[in-house]
Image: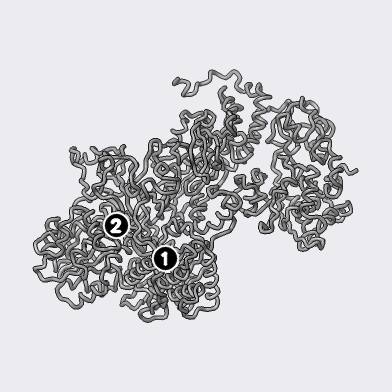
Amino acid sequence: MTTQPLTGRMHADGTPVSLAEYRDAGGYAAMEETFGHLSAEDLQAVVKGANLRGRGGAGFPTGVKWSFVPADESTQPHYLVANADEMEPGTFKDRLLMENDPHQLLEGMALAAYAIRAHTAYIFLRGEYFLAAERLRAAIAEARAAGLLGRDVLKSGYDLDIHLHTSAGRYICGEETALLNALEGKRATPRAKPPFPQVSGAWGQPTVVNNVETLCNIPHIVRLGAEWYSGVSNSKDGGTKLYGASGKVRRAGCWELPMGTTAREIVEEHAGGMRDGYRLRGWLPGGASTDFLLEEHLDLAMDYDTIGKAGSRMGTGNLIILDDQTCPVKMVRNLEHFFARESCGWCTPCRDGLSWVETLLNDLIEGRGRPEDLQVLEEHTRRLGPGNTFCAHAPGAMEPLQSALKYFRDDFLKYLGDQPGVIPMLHERVV
Amino acid sequence: MATIHVDGREYEVDDNDNLLQACLEQGLDLPYFCWHPAMGSVGACRQCAVIQYQDEDDTRGRVVMSCMTPVADGARISLQAPEAREFRASITELLMTNHPHDCPVCEEGGECHLQDMTVMTGHNYRRFRGLKRTHRNQYLGPFLNHEMNRCIACYRCTRFYREYAGGDDLHALASADNVYFGRHEDGVLDSVFSGNLAEVCPTGVFTDRTLSSRYTRKWDLQTAPSVCVHCSLGCNTSPGERAGSVRRIQNRYNGAVNGYFLCDRGRYGYEFANGDDRVREPLAREPDADAARSISVDEAVDRATAVLSGARGYALIGIGSPRASLEANFALRELVGPDAFHAGYDDREQAMLERILEIYRGSPARAPSLRDIESADAVLVLGEDLLNTAPRMALSLRQAARGAAVEHAEKLGIPAWQDHSVRQAGGARRSPIFLATTCATEIDELAAATLHGGPAEIAAFAQAVARALDRDAPQPVMVDSETGALARRVADALAAARRPLIISGTSSHSLGLVNAAANVAHALCDGARNVHLSMITAECNSLGLAMLEPAPLADAFERARQQEDYVVVVLENDLYRRGPRESVRGLLNNAGHCIVIDSLLTATGRDADLVLPAASFAEGDGTLVSSEGRAQRFFQVCPPAGAVRESWRWLQACTAGEGVAGEGLGAWNCLDDVTAACAAAFPGLAQITAAAPGHAFRMHGMRLPRQPHRYSGRTALNAATSVHEPQPAEDPDSPFAFSMEGFHGSRPGSLIASTWSPGWNSVQSLNKFQEEIGGRVRGGDGGVRLLEPHSELNLSWLDPAAEAPAGQGDLLLLPLPQIFGSEELSARGPAIGERTPEPFVAVNAGTAGDLGIEAGGCVELDAGDGVKRQLTLRIIPSLPDASAGVPEQFPGLEGLRFPARASLRRVEP
């Protein structure tokens, strides 16, 4: 049984899987089986049945997302966009997929486009992914030459073009509506929802934005079926997952494992455990915008619901490990610096709140902190919470901060130390 | 309608609104920044947060942004819940982290929405200890100051400038907490609506630069309701005055007319009223003296009376003015008699204006308000370069263009106030707009198709449209197949529309074009749709003067040639802008006496032997008729200083003598008497008395103060000359007083000069004065419409043949109206002057090639009027072949007739 459908064909030397190799391994067969044989609704049903959940971090069921696209012909043109703007700190799974097996993404995109009746698709690629850009460009040309893209794909009567767009580079472009604005050449500011992109997306037309890893699952679901897909998973969510680990582990990397693999297995077996002299103190399950978990949580299955129940999010499934010799406050400062810089500047709490948070953390670390600052930081974790800001950027930024304040409070207090008497605030003096 | 529960109270609200709008409409105080009543919601500032509860049992609720949440029947929200108040205060705290707190030196101080909202949210003490971010400011031209450190990044400026007004040189730049709103480099803002930024910005980033140069706090300004005198649209304005000079113009909301916005000509054109070329004392010129000398009022009256008394046996010739009030014109007409009262515009313009009145009085096509224009769903513009002839209408047209996008979004369930979603979902959809103009205009991007040509081509095209709509319409002169196809396309779009609109006017100087435009409207009037026909006229009271049925100006010239003894009285008019130089000179110089009443010293005034200083719009009252046919009253903002008085009062004073004609004038005690006499004399003007309440109107027995209740320095202003506080000036003409005392509350719309409400010191306080947000003001929008459509068509087809151009030459000379420079009064101000180009003559590249002249070269224009003019050549690629365009009424180009034939030749400068 295929247990590593996404990465199994990849070459050890890092060269990309060619079109011929991809086809030999069963590639593009799913397209051949589908185009002209299955209806768009049938294909949506197949993916819904497999319970594929979006791999970008939110875990929304992919088939359900597709079903929101109106079927009415008058709503054409539709667009499919592959979200390849992988800018989450500590996450490098999409890069692996695109650099090493670009045709897999193209086939996944072709199937997804077919399912939503789109004839134009875009890959919105992180600007710094030069190698991925080069390999995707080559793969698109190869596919077009082989009749796998362009007019009348595989003589099915279905037309599809895929365009590669390299981003000018902002973290917020990973947010699907900001991505669409950027794709249109506008400021990368998120859009209000509703309307959702499935109804009014790129250029106001129905659009689906799917993550690269999500799209790469689709050919295998179509070819091998929902039953197989559930079978390769250790969890009620189907399929495999590209897990990763970075930090002071022996072998940082990215591995395709059954969905629901425990964090302990990822850290201890695949990443080889902590380097000598380092102990694991905490971990972010899926990128910078997830809550810290501790060593006691390592035996949890890495799937959306289990990690959610533990008070964090699985996010991208690429772990960032905090060791005992790295200061958690400085780590959080580093993250908040990133989030404050990457705020698009649209809404007040995110634009001005994140930079205040960064200022407070800098003050604390550089010895200018005051005890009440911790309260202000805590206030921010609520003030910048979900629903209070325009998009999920600031709430995401607050996740490592709020959990660090909970789990590593002593490290924060340590910076306040034995500093001389704190000058009271003006209003305190007045009172 | 829907019922919502706010803090336990039930309110009936419009279910098309969002919660913020609904709360404000109910008079509740809820702070906001990014939402704007004309621009809708985008959810950026997060200031209008409220707690929404799922049902009666939900006690926790959740924070929602009221501006982004649609009203739903049964919705339960709280504005006062501690969580809501805390959240809103925290947003202000965040906005304040970078705000410089420079209120004492900030020009916005005292009318700052940010100040108001900060107080409203209760945020007081600063906890942020970090450094504030600072920005470099930019030079943005003569109209606006830029102080970016004050910015709270509400994005209103770029939303207005780019999305609402179509500008493209103001950007949101950079990101995070360093967002910068400015140009890519220092430079003049292109948009002619840029001045609105001073009101759109909720704090002091963009402030009025003309106000800066003679700065006064809002609370120290006297205001009265006024009407813009710089084009024919009649936008409502609120001038602010201190110590005898006008300091600024602000928008005065009128739901049917200008709404929330003005154009820059209207906002900054006021500076002429403070100018050095104002006539402030009567001037007399002896027959053999070169220069005039100042004389006293008494002497001026004596001289005028002597001249005007019938004993001398002089005939009288009176010349009215399209930029003077109905009352001033009527007073002159009473003085000289109906037969001797001549139009203050040329005969072509008179014929067009009379035709326009005939059209409005005889057809079901309705003259639209600017608000009506925003909801037109197909538009054909014939001959008007709107951005230059009626700029505010171009802004309304831009909103009309969005109609199709808004409609599409509504089909997707997106309410119209959800601004960015509507723009997103609407995509490139536009309601069809067709522009037929002399050459490319700055609003061509709105158009589904454009056609460029002279008045003859445009009239023929219009007639082809009329013919395509109605086979009974007369055949147009030959149009080429391309134009014919376009005409059919336009006809189809207009016929498919529910609210089609035809816009034309007098700027092409072509009666044939006016006729053809009317023919198109009439062809559409088959009862199936609401047809609007907008005819732009040249000046603020062109239509009003036409309604006084003056005799032609050419007749006055003719009388001057024939009669030896006559006295000419010219009212607020520079005749050298109206007719051939020789005719004007003849009329003025052959007169036994020439009396000019004007606020500015013009070329005409220099030829007069008596000049009487007239009040400007700021110092006088009167009634103007806009091109919509709306009669509107403007009021004195400040009393006239020294010898200055309103024209009708001069005319009255000069007829007080024994044996002087026009004894009727003596019976007038105040403006209302003049207005009433005028209304009685002309059935078409019968309603003008209702344009605003009369002088006896009182609220609760009180007058309405011009000064806000915080007006300061009353006793100190004149202390340098006298420590005695002067008696406030009397105002016999209006319900207003030159005082702080009186009734400050709500009142009829025509009497609202500026708005204020406790806690709301900025222009945003308007919410408290409207029946619904963006709708009518309580007490009704100001003005009264004089021209309502006729139920059925009483006109036959009109002759679309264009006039033959006068004179000889290879080129057809066409007028190119300019927003800055073509209008007489505004052109005198320094700020507008900075934006006014040097006079030029333009041809297309082909014509320039044929003539062997390059752009920037010096050419001599011979328009056959005996004057050779040296001008710089400009290339405007879209000008028709074998034509030349000159800016209308620029210095040295006054008095040119259009269309004319002309020739150009290269000369050395």
* Residue B364 circle label: 1
Of tags 2 and 1, the one toward the viewer is: 1
Q: Please state the horizontal and vertical placement of residue B431, each as a whole percent of the image.
A: 54, 61
Q: Please state the horizontal and vertical placement of residue B288, each as a whole percent of the image.
A: 14, 68
Q: Is residue A326 left or right of residue B796?
A: right
Tell me the crowding category of disc 1: few under 14, some 14 to 19, or many 20 or more residues within 10 angstroms, Cα based. many
Question: Is B52 situated above or below B535?
Answer: above
Residue A317 visible in the snapshot = yes
Instruction: Report the Cα–Cα distance between label 2 and label 1.
Output: 22 Å
Q: Please state the horizontal and vertical placement of residue A386, each as a whole percent of the image.
A: 62, 35
User: The disc labelled 1 sits on which kind of residue?
Assistant: Pro
Q: Chain of mark 2?
A: B
Taking depth in this image into account, of B877 and A395 the one nearest to the observer is A395
Which residue in the structure is indicated by mark 2? B688
Looking at the rendered structure, the secondary structure element under dot 2 is helix
Question: Is A69 situated above or below B824?
Answer: above
